[in-house]
């Protein structure tokens, strides 16, 4: 079934391509966005990073931070283009949207494909289970060792890669395209636990009526820091450079923290990103 949101996203992508299509061929994307009055943000309907409201308005922590940065650069509006998580980088490179604003984690493989901003968040990992499930899970290893647990992950996510690297059998992993699919799978008993960032599992379980709870929050395997950032096409330096400059300023002056708080982000997620360089993170 084609949802209203899918139709909207397709319409936005078509309209945006008509207005901004030349940008993918090397034009100044920031100048084009100022002329058109908007730029297009790629989101994956992953709450609380980037998602569409029931009124078809893009929001989320990444979206609101991008909105603030772009407003300061003279781009009045943002439009949301929804895709599966696995479609974010191909969609960006293919010109379906102009910036990924979806809390995408900076990894070496992704650094080779896109141009990241400096980090905006530092993320831990987390597990969500059904509310009646009283088990505590403090690490990926605990899930791997519990041979009866099936785990839901976002397709293409770092969590999927983490669990595979630790030897979790593929038959025990269900990779799904979005958080709503994961929620349905968990509550329906198709999976026993959902693995996401700590921010995402807290958001999923925040409402007492969610019938979910957080079963564990823990550091990235090996103790490394894991950062998320905005992503641009490698050719779009005319947008990425001023965007990054203003993002760093909004991180330092507390604006990013203020915009992030309604979406469940704490100082633990924001402060470690202040002053960190994407070159440092990509080379880590």
Image (tube, grey):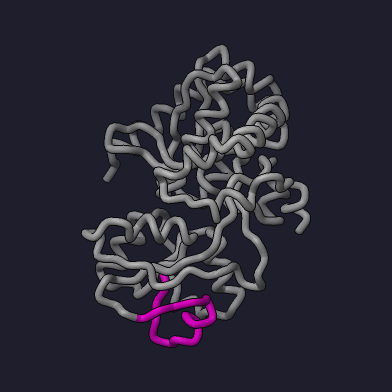
Relative horizontal placement of residue 110, taking residue 8 as reference (left or right): right
What residue do we see at 57% from left, 61% from top? 158
In the rendered structure, does residue 140 fall within the stretch colored magenta?
Answer: yes
Q: In the image, residue 24 lies at what x, y percent?
A: 64, 27
Res 3 quadrant in image: top left
In the rendered structure, does residue 73 fall within the stretch colored magenta?
Answer: no
What residue do we see at 48% from left, 39% from top? 258
Res 129 quadrant in image: bottom left
Task: Point out the stretch of residues depicted in magenta.
Answer: 135-151
Relative horizontal placement of residue 170, taking residue 110 as reference (left or right): left
Q: In the image, residue 91 lies at what x, y percent?
A: 55, 40
In this view, 170 is above or below 26: below
Q: In the image, residue 266 lies at what x, y percent?
A: 49, 52
In this view, 229 is above or below 169: above
Foreground of the two, 233 or 223:
223
Relative horizontal placement of residue 186, taking residue 194 as reference (left or right): left
Q: In the image, residue 70 lies at what x, y percent?
A: 56, 25
């Amino acid at each position: 079934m084609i949802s209203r949101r899918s139709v909207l996203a397709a319409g936005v992508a078509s309209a945006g391509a008509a207005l901004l299509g030349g940008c993918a061929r090397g034009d100044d994307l920031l100048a084009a966005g100022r002329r058109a009055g908007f730029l297009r943000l790629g989101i994956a309907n992953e709450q609380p990073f980037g998602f569409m409201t029931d009124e078809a308005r893009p929001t989320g922590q990444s979206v609101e931070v991008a909105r603030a940065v772009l407003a300061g650069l003279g781009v009045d509006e943002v439009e949301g283009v929804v895709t599966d998580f696995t479609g974010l980088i191909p969609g960006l490179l293919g010109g379906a949207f102009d910036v990924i604003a979806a809390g995408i984690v900076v990894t070496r493989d992704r650094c080779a494909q896109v141009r990241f901003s400096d980090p905006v968040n530092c993320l831990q990992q987390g597990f969500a289970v059904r509310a009646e499930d009283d088990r505590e899970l403090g690490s990926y290893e605990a899930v791997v060792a519990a041979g009866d647990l099936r785990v839901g992950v976002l397709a293409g996510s770092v969590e999927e890669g983490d669990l595979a690297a630790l030897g979790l059998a593929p038959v025990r992993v269900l990779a799904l395209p979005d958080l709503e699919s994961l929620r349905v799978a968990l509550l329906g008993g198709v999976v026993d636990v959902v693995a996401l960032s700590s921010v995402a599992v807290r958001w999923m379980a925040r409402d007492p009526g969610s019938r979910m709870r957080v079963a564990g929050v823990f550091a990235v395997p090996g103790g490394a820091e894991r950062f998320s950032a905005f992503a641009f096409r490698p050719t779009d330096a005319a947008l990425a450079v001023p965007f990054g400059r203003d993002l760093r300023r909004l991180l330092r002056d507390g604006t990013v923290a203020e915009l992030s708080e309604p979406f469940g982000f704490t100082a633990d997620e924001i402060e470690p990103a202040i002053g960190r360089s994407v070159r440092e993170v990509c080379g880590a």
